[in-house]
Image (cartoon, rainbow, N blue to C red):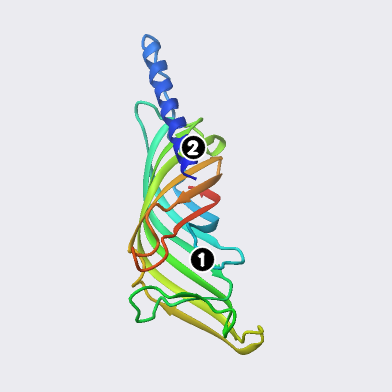
Amino acid sequence: MKKVFLLAAGVLFVTALFAQTDSLKTQPKKKKQFDLSNRSNDHFLLQFGYAGWNNQPDTINTKGLPRSFNVYFMLDFPFKSNPHFSAAIGAGVGTDHIFFDKMYLGIKDPTSALTVKDVSDTTHFKKYKLATAWLEVPVELRYSFNPENPNKSWKIAIGAKVGTLVNAHTKGKTWQNSQNQTLISYIQKESSKRFFNSTRIVPTIRIGYGHFSLYGAYQVTSLFKEGLGPDVRPYSIGLTLSGL
């Protein structure tokens, strides 16, 4: 994932360098004028993706389809010197949902460190997940091959988002015994942010055409506070739908 970010950054840097070189070579010629009056460039972003944990210990069993869902509104500012490039900043909400296989996370337990244990040989929930929600500020450096009509153009964007944790909770459904027989059909939800880092930093990348692009995100900060939980780094890959 880190190599992808570096590669994309290199592509944008080289593209900008060649654009600057071409501009110097053609200074005597009249500079092309771009009509950006009808420009709409990815102001509203919806992202659906697969979520995972890097550095996940072997003692933690996950299952199902972990997922990420993000919503952002961003303002886009084209470069006057080269409208192919633009900078964008915005705000929004990012969420991750990780599903576990007969595990228990004691995010609300009065312990000095997070309790994470396998409960397959005792009573457990049939379905169990950890959900986190973040208020985020994303920034991007964008390149559009057709800045006058980005809705019909290939586009590349690299950036990062800084988030603050607004909610973390576990949710268990259907209480079972060790033989996976249902004992009680009910839902239990426990919320606590005590073991989690309150801030996260996530480099991002998007590559696509028109309203659709593929995205990747890798959290460089640990999900849990140092010494209080496993040193896992969440990531997600998926599809972005953009508009406005």
Residue drawn at 40 percent across, 57 percent down: 92
Query: As shown in the figure, which amino acid type bears the numbered disc 1?
Result: His
200 in relation to 169, above or below? above
Q: Secondary structure at mark 1?
A: strand
Q: Nearer the viewer, residue 136 or 182?
A: 182
Residue drawn at 59 percent across, 83 percent down: 174
Q: Which residue is mark 2?
A: 156
Q: Secondary structure at mark 2?
A: strand
Coordinates of residue 155 in the picture (x, y in percent): 51, 36
| Front tag of 2 and 1 | 1
Q: Are marks 2 and 1 in contact (CB under 8 Å)?
A: no
Kindly indicate the quadrant of the structure image that contains residue 136: bottom left
Q: Report how far apart the C-alphas of labels 2 and 1 lie in the structure.
A: 27 Å
Residue drawn at 44 percent across, 60 percent down: 232
Determine whether, in the image, residue 160 is placed left or right of residue 175. left
Q: Which residue is mark 1?
A: 97
Q: Residues within 10 Å of mark 1 (few under 14, many from 20)?
A: many
Residue drawn at 36 percent across, 12 percent down: 27
Kindly indicate the quadrant of the structure image that contains residue 120: bottom right
Coordinates of residue 4 in the picture (x, y in percent): 50, 40
2 or 1: tag closer to the N-terminus = 1
Coordinates of residue 237 in the picture (x, y in percent): 54, 51
Q: Nearer the viewer, residue 164 or 75?
A: 164
Residue 236 is labelled as none
